[in-house]
Amino acid sequence: MAVLATSGLLKAQDVAPAATSKNHSEAAEIDANTLAIAKPADVILPTGSPRPAGSMPAMAIVVVQPPTKPAVHPFWDRQNQILFAANGALAASDFFVTRWNLEHSGKEMNPVTRLMSGSTPALAANFALETGGVMGVSYLFHKTGHHKLERITSYVNLGGSAYAVCYGMAHR
């Protein structure tokens, strides 16, 4: 440190005299090399007197913190538990309404489910896989950071299942 002070290399870190003015003490400068905000401040010497005339103003350095990452919710949080329970309940309701309609000479309108409508265990497996598929796709979106899509997947399936239950109840 003593070698640098005597050689004059420390003077390269000083503020240029042209940069110091009376109005300059109000403005803040952004130092791109250190990502800090430097702003001149009046120096009060330990004796209590203000700095001597002609001396350079001291620079107060305020470190700029990078933005923090938002906290990621756990997959099995309360909202997902409610959504998955509602999906399961509506899938079970859809199964029972569909099964009742098929037993009373009704017709399955969904072409995918129609393939399994001849067997009660196959129909139950269809609705169980539907609920499991919603959970799987939601988990995939959760792991890839698409948290809005994670919720939207459940909402879309809830809407489809609710429509199917209402339609089946209306056409008994």
Image (cartoon, helix red, strand yellow):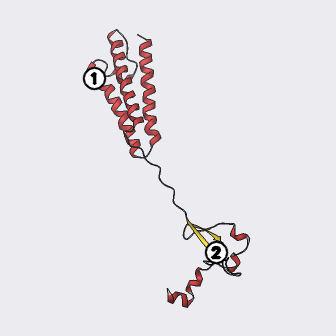
Instruction: Find residue 4 and report its horizontal and vertical position in percent.
Output: 52, 87
Instruction: Find residue 62 and report its horizontal and vertical position in percent.
Output: 57, 66
Residue 22: quarter of image: bottom right
| Identity, as a three-letter code, of the amino acid under mark 1 | Ala
Q: Nearer the viewer, mark 1 or mark 2?
A: 2
Instruction: Find residue 96 and report its horizontal and vertical position in percent.
Output: 34, 17
Mark 1 or 2, nearer chain start:
2
Disc assigned to residue 5? none
Q: Which residue is mark 2?
A: 44
Q: Is residue 148 above or below residue 99?
A: below
Q: Nearer the viewer, residue 144 or 73?
A: 73
Residue 167: quarter of image: top left
Secondary structure of residue under mark 2: loop
Secondary structure of residue under mark 1: helix
Query: Looking at the rendering, in which quadrant would you find the C terminus?
Result: top left
Query: Distance between the Cα atoms at labels 1 and 2?
Result: 84 Å
At 56% from the left and 86% from the top, the residue drawn is 9
Classify residue 137 as left or right of residue 18: left
At 43% from the left and 11% from the top, the residue drawn is 171
